[in-house]
Image: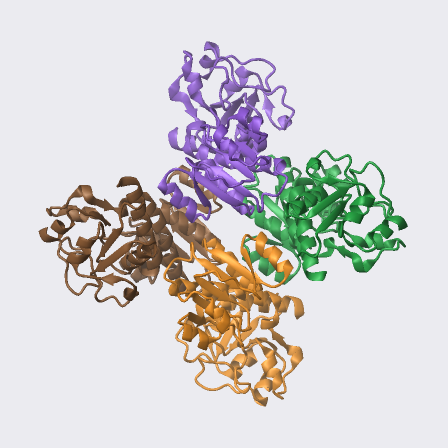
Chain colours: A purple, B green, C orange, D brown
Amino acid sequence: MRKIEYFGIVGGDKRQLETALSIQKDGYNVNICGFENANFKIKDLKQDTLNNVISKSEGIILPLPVTRNGTSLNAPFSNSEILLNNEFFELLKDKKVFCGMAEILYKSDLPYNKNNIYDYFNREEFTVENAVPTAEGAIEIAMREYSGTINGSKCLVTGYGRIGKILAKFLTGLGADVTVSARKKEDEAWIKLQGYHFANTNNLPEIQFDIIFNTIPSTIFNARTLAKTAANAVLIDLASAPYGVDYNAAKRLGINAIKAPSLPGKVAPKTAGEIIKNTIYNIIEEEL
Amino acid sequence: MRKIEYFGIVGGDKRQLETALSIQKDGYNVNICGFENANFKIKDLKQDTLNNVISKSEGIILPLPVTRNGTSLNAPFSNSEILLNNEFFELLKDKKVFCGMAEILYKSDLPYNKNNIYDYFNREEFTVENAVPTAEGAIEIAMREYSGTINGSKCLVTGYGRIGKILAKFLTGLGADVTVSARKKEDEAWIKLQGYHFANTNNLPEIQFDIIFNTIPSTIFNARTLAKTAANAVLIDLASAPYGVDYNAAKRLGINAIKAPSLPGKVAPKTAGEIIKNTIYNIIEEEL
Amino acid sequence: MRKIEYFGIVGGDKRQLETALSIQKDGYNVNICGFENANFKIKDLKQDTLNNVISKSEGIILPLPVTRNGTSLNAPFSNSEILLNNEFFELLKDKKVFCGMAEILYKSDLPYNKNNIYDYFNREEFTVENAVPTAEGAIEIAMREYSGTINGSKCLVTGYGRIGKILAKFLTGLGADVTVSARKKEDEAWIKLQGYHFANTNNLPEIQFDIIFNTIPSTIFNARTLAKTAANAVLIDLASAPYGVDYNAAKRLGINAIKAPSLPGKVAPKTAGEIIKNTIYNIIEEEL
Amino acid sequence: MRKIEYFGIVGGDKRQLETALSIQKDGYNVNICGFENANFKIKDLKQDTLNNVISKSEGIILPLPVTRNGTSLNAPFSNSEILLNNEFFELLKDKKVFCGMAEILYKSDLPYNKNNIYDYFNREEFTVENAVPTAEGAIEIAMREYSGTINGSKCLVTGYGRIGKILAKFLTGLGADVTVSARKKEDEAWIKLQGYHFANTNNLPEIQFDIIFNTIPSTIFNARTLAKTAANAVLIDLASAPYGVDYNAAKRLGINAIKAPSLPGKVAPKTAGEIIKNTIYNIIEEEL
């Protein structure tokens, strides 16, 4: 594992600070920059200039997503923009670079060195582990918004991918009555033997669910489906764009529909940071 | 069950409104008073004057606790004080009265008719069921305050009474690593066979727990125990007075200690209201 | 704990041999007698005469039950009867004696010294822990006798004492659809919040259960109840005398009713022996 | 679903009889042949000659596997051999034929009509659902062979495919301390977040497990691995050929290694039969 001893963390939100702290705790050298305005745990970390941080480090950790606009680094706590320009990539030339959603980077015509860039967001274990804070964040929202307890409530989870699987398990652990929807016979078999009720995503039942969690990025909850949904249901949309709910229709029908993207960084930055760290460690072990 | 057809709900918080709605939904006649300032679901219920509500009803449901000061009804949404005076008890004389914590009432020298007063708070099933919203409320606080996920966190639950049992079960259902403390060998046996780690309450381990839930109404977390507690731990005190934490010491040590009493009414008024209703139904079935 | 260094195990079945092995493994001196005909793990233990074993030992462990007939020790593997006579009790006079179900002993007029006799069977933690091998043994029988899987089967557990609680938990862990019967409102509350279906023991539902586990020592399954039971149900009676089934009626109706007493020693002697050991250690710690 | 009204079940073991009974219970016409020597539930089914059964039926259900030797039908309860000859396939020509492991059939040069033959064994949901009786059967063996309880025992499950997943879940449901081995980082992530301990299949830990379940069809437990295994461990091999254990080495080392193939039909014929039925229904719904 000791292929890299010096890490530089450049830009990002609370998650990246937690990544930095967690790597430092493991005994590595860590320097950070782009967090001038963070008021969070920053005093335990060494801050330096961009140039210094990069030149001192063998491995550079960039944010998730690495950029939102394609031209500057995603660095909400930085007091100045960090441009994704020639100069920046020149600095990174001989470094191992770890970032999330590198494909946005690659859309530009910057002189990045793909051989040195590792996307932690694309790793299977990252996605699996990240489903945990997503599921917990969703449950926290449900607890806040729903006027009863999760225990004893009727919950619907649409989709049986990573988030659906973990959410169904956690809800059952809290004593909810859980229905999971999917389309494939194989998923139906798994859903049933886990003890959940099964529903066909193409034909959701007219049961009056108390809480609905959508994980499918497609408008499952259009005007027609929403019309069959209980008016006092809480509907939490965990799907990424194009999302799963017709929000105008929901508003019209008085249904409490909540768009909840990017939960891990918001609800559990510490865990989210550790997941980034673990994935980077795995990359170093397997790919470097 | 149909021994009472007309219910009057007088005073109380959101829980009592939910009790009223839930009884009404079961097909009984319900009238309420003392909720003039509530802006919550009130339009689905019939409001009337104190005199009318009581004279129209066979069963009168008073709040939990029925009074806080011993002299007036606990009616936070009322626009005038409802005094616990002769006149009030004269009105109730021939009614079946259901209330919570009647013993505060009995401390005064009011002309109450004990034969007609039933305390739903004293029933075993009320206490058991109420432990569920308490446990969920505690978990909601933990999710909000702890920067990681419950899944994978090290949790300590002190005390293996009703709340301790349910909390340990829910935390395990979310994938936490749960230690439960108790004093009796019998409890130790139960705790271990449920798959929890056991700790002796008299000698808590120096493990660095992420989240601690106290359910014991005695200062378990005094300065000495707190000194052994991780500085970044979240400590949630669910015990009633005299509480379980030396809050001054916690503050001095920078430990995030949170006093969280009376959770059911706050986090899950609907469930809390249904528990009151179910207990009243049981009283009617068994005692009337 | 080191109040006793030398243990003598006299009489008993496989459980007592496992108790002996487990104590020996903890570093104590162990001598046994009354196991001449055991062909099981006996070679790892030191056998000696009754006189020698007792005189060499500070603590003497007698079987569970200590006697079946009141006159001789319960020693199925012994090649001669060990009489509970004056001579025997003279030998034990200054020893700490641990046995199970001492009350049968006390019915005789033998010169036992009650101050030196400790009944491990009476300890709460013994009974709790013993419910585990009982529940597992019951599930093993159900797996063998029922032609389907426990997963997905409809199970009824009558009684919500120690065995009922553990059995319901294990069956749920295997994915059964579990109904638990009880009589008290408090038990009803617990049963429901654990996610089981509730039934009133006084009025069992006419559901066609696949497997029924009785834990109540009273003829719940009399001719009338059995007439409502599915003919192909498996009915496992875990109650002690007077048992829970009218076996003649069951035979007449062709219902597969199985009397299954004393499971721990039969299905899991190792665990049963460790439970005896742990209980004796607790007695030494607390009472000696 | 009512595309086929008349079913003929020809050959097979108890599972096929249960399939026949279950289809008949759903209201279809069912005739069977090849069960002359079965003494099991046979009286509730209509037996007829091979010719009559096939000519009366639209759908013919053949066994799993359809043949063991390639020349005659797998019909252990038949009093004469049913040859897989021209004549037999001529009879089936215009029928919908459902069988298991059709590929053995296709190795011969018989005049089968592949367009009419549907292999239920190849369907994903069949394999998933069948993992349940396999897992339960394995647990039943473990309960019988291991002298302690599953609760509290240290279990290793090698492989995180269908059987590994279900087995780990059930063992946890019984309170075992479960380690699961796999090779992929993604599986590691899933294993850990389910609360199991993780081990790398390529490098199994030297922990003294009480019970080991192998699901990998490759000699994981060779002489070298077995030498690190506790002498009193129970090792249950659920893998199909070439199996997972060097049985000679196990014998030499005195390890209790048990080859346990084809559990569903043995331990839960009713469930196994229902799984065949459900899969055939799915085929009819989707493919006919």
User: Which is more toward the observer, D203 or A64?
Assistant: A64
Quarter of the rendering occupied by the C terminus of chain A = top left
Q: Position of residue D88 (x, y in %)?
A: 13, 53
Q: Which residue occupies the foreground of this view, B95 or B117? A: B95
Q: Is residue C282 left or right of residue C168?
A: right
Report the front residue among B171 and D88: D88
Q: Exactly how many numbered labels are in the figure?
A: 0
The residue drawn where x is 14% and y is 51% is D91
Question: Residue at image x 25%, y 62%?
Answer: D46
Q: Residue at x 25, y 53 (%)?
A: D7
Vertical placement of residue A55 versus A173, above or below: above
Image position of D255 (left or right of A86): left
- Residue C65 lies in what quarter of the image? bottom right
**Residue B48 makes an appearance in the image:** yes
- D222, above or below C232, in the image: above
State the image coordinates of residue B106 (x, y, percent, origin top left).
Answer: 84, 55
- The vertical placement of A213 against B175, above or below, is above
Q: Nearer the viewer, residue C19 or B20?
A: B20
Percent coordinates x, y for residue B199 in the rendering: 62, 54
Which quarter shows the N terminus of chain A? top left
Image spot of residue B46 (x, y percent): 73, 40
Tell me, yes or no, if residue B146 can be seen here. no
Relative to A285, is B43 on the left or the right? right
